Image (spheres, rainbow, N blue to C red):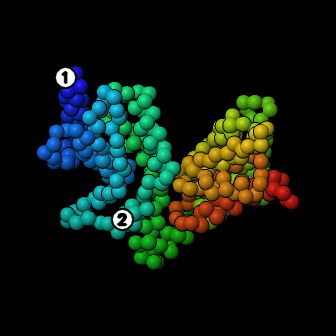
Amino acid sequence: MEEHEDTQNNIERQNDELLVLKAVYGEDSVEEFESNLPRHNSSFVFYLKLSDIPVVAPIQFSYPTEYPSLKAPTYELLDVVEEYPENSDGSTDKSARKRAFFRLTYSNVMLTEIKSIFTQTWEEEYRGEVVILAWVEKLHEYLSHKWGESYKELLSEAEIRDKPADENQKEKQEGNDIIKAEQTNKLSTSTKDKVETALCPYHDSCSQIFQGPVFEEKKSVFIGFLTKVHSETDVDCFRRRLLMDKKIAKATHNILAYRIKNKNGFYLQDNDDDGETAAGKRLQMLLVNTGVENVAVIVSRWYGGVLLGPERFKLINNAARAVLESSGHLKGS
């Protein structure tokens, strides 16, 4: 009898949660699956619209009988759908936007991070309470951050391709002139082939930071930075020191990897893509393959308006290798 009452109470709270989702996001944001069965393990799709990107991220949620009293709902991230804005004649322009959208996908890193966010939110804040509204809000913030810059970059390239060749050529020349002038002002400290150093304002014992040469390709700029590290605290300090520089803090991506050899002979190593999917892992592999130890490397990239495709990974690698060589951390350098 008590179990039946708990189930009925859960069903009522599930119904209330659906009403709140519809009230906050609109009736069309929720698609319930019709069923002749009671609401036991029932499912629905929530269509999450992102504010700054014209896409919808559908999520299928399933209610276990024990939710929310004992168990969390389960979820599945479905394929992203783009919203095409209407033209004045009622038609939709899909050309540039469509090509940009097709590359917005969930990476394995993103799936892991989303799972962590959802699990932590349930375990630490909402256990025993309805949680989907909180999940949706956190997912909106996460996707806007992760996909925002990538979408702008992809869309920029797609729109350029849609323009007539002569117009593209004119804009390309004008853009080159502007970018070169801006880079001269913004990156004036990045002297070609000169290694710069910086002292830590937090700890006297922190190692100096080495700065490698500048790599430029189609208006994008890549610079590698390196320091010696012996703990994750040193890594965090390294990142904070670099981000004190406003130019570096405003970089499109600051990709990090580090590799520390512990006294027991095992390695402590990790990486951070900073929104450039798979770049951190590639940078990590460079450290492993070159055999360097007790170093952290950050490669900063300033996007120049032209999509580089896979070439960007080569440039990130080159910038990292260059600072490893110029700072004397590669064998034989």
Is residue 66 visible in the rendered image? The answer is yes
The percent coordinates of residue 229 (x first, y second) are: 75, 40
> Is 102 located above or below residue 245 in the figure?
below
CA separation, marks 1 and 2?
Answer: 55 Å
Q: Earlier in the sequence, mark 1 or mark 2?
A: 1
> Is 191 located above or below residue 35 in the figure?
below
Q: Residue at x 61, y 52 (%)?
A: 280
Q: Residue at x 52, y 61 (%)?
A: 305
Residue type highlighted by circle 1: Met
The residue identified by callout 1 is 1
Instruction: Give the side of residue 178 with respect to residue 328, left or right.
Output: left
Q: Nearer the viewer, residue 190 or 73?
A: 73
Farthest residue to the front: give it.
1
- State which quarter of the image contains the N terminus: top left
Secondary element type, mark 1: loop
Count residues near mark 2 (Cα–Cα under 10 Å), then give few for <14, some for 14-19, many for 20+.
Answer: some
Q: Residue at x 69, y 34 (%)?
A: 233
The residue identified by callout 2 is 98
Quarter of image, res 165: bottom left
Residue type highlighted by circle 2: Lys
Farthest residue to the right: give it.
332
The percent coordinates of residue 317 (x first, y second) are: 67, 60
The percent coordinates of residue 166 (x first, y second) are: 46, 78
The percent coordinates of residue 142 (x first, y second) are: 44, 43
